[in-house]
Image (cartoon, rainbow, N blue to C red):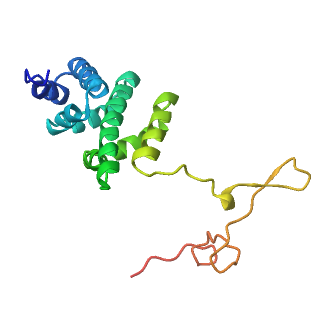
């Protein structure tokens, strides 16, 4: 495939063709990242496959989003292997972030498809150093005495004083008169 110069037109189709053709090109590129060696995957990256794969992360087709995520994950694995061998940063992660892929992967954490959600979490934690968000204990409601209800309290200011809300606008409840 590489020797016959198929990759550049395939990346071109992935970038510019109508959606049905882009889907087929995505399958071909993703399959190439899955079965290719590190040198072949780097060639795909040099040919510009990252941005169009990242662009597919926003389509309304869960299977194609999954295929794009799998291709990107395979690319990230190659970057991770290089990173471990050289001690340098994962350059593939940088390329994906520059192609707005990191932002799109973060947004996909809200996807209704659980497989997509799980794959995004795995990619973010493994290749971008994003930790699972911890629950913020001060925001969680506390159990009231008796354990049958939640107790909510008003937030406290940084000086420890209870915050209050003033809806009067500072004019004793009456609207301020317009200025001259």
Q: Nearer the viewer, residue 91 or 176?
A: 91
| Residue 23 figure quarter | top left
Residue 78 in the image, given as x and y percentages of width and height: 30, 39
Residue at 45% in and 34% down: 119
162 to the left or right of 4: right
List the single residue furthest toward the left: 4
* Quadrant assignment for the C terminus: bottom left
List the single residue furthest toward the front: 85
Residue 155 in the image, given as x and y percentages of width and height: 67, 67
Q: Nearer the viewer, residue 128 or 85?
A: 85
Q: Is there any visible trace of residue 113 in the rendered image?
A: no
| Residue 57 figure quarter | top left
Residue 60 in the image, given as x and y percentages of width and height: 37, 26
Residue 34 in the image, given as x and y percentages of width and height: 31, 26
Residue at 44% in and 44% down: 126
Residue at 22% in and 22% down: 25
Residue 66, compared with residue 107, is above or below; it is: above
100 to the left or right of 175: left
List the single residue furthest toward the right: 146
Q: Nearer the viewer, residue 55 or 157?
A: 55
Q: How many marks?
A: 0
Residue 159, compared with residue 137, is above or below; it is: below
Q: Is there any visible trace of residue 169 in the rendered image?
A: yes
* Quadrant assignment for the N terminus: top left
Residue 95, compared with residue 42, is above or below; it is: below
| Residue 27 figure quarter | top left
Residue 16, compared with residue 103, is above or below; it is: above
């Amino acid at each position: 495939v590489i020797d016959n110069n198929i990759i550049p037109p395939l990346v071109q189709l992935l970038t510019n063709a109508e959606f049905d053709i882009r889907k087929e090109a995505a399958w071909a590129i993703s399959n190439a990242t899955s079965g290719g060696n590190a040198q072949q995957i780097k060639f795909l990256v040099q040919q510009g496959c990252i941005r169009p794969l990242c662009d597919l992360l926003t389509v309304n087709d869960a299977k194609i989003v999954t295929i794009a995520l799998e291709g990107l994950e395979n690319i990230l694995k190659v970057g991770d292997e290089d990173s471990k061998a050289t001690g340098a940063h994962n350059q593939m992660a940088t390329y994906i972030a520059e192609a707005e892929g990191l932002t799109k992967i973060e947004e996909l954490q809200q996807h209704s498809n659980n497989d997509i959600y799980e794959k995004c979490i795995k990619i973010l934690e493994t290749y971008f150093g994003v930790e699972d968000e911890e629950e913020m204990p001060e925001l969680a409601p506390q159990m009231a005495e008796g354990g049958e209800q939640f107790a909510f309290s008003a937030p406290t200011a940084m000086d420890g004083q209870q915050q209050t809300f003033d809806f009067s606008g500072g004019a004793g409840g009456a609207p301020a008169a317009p200025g001259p």
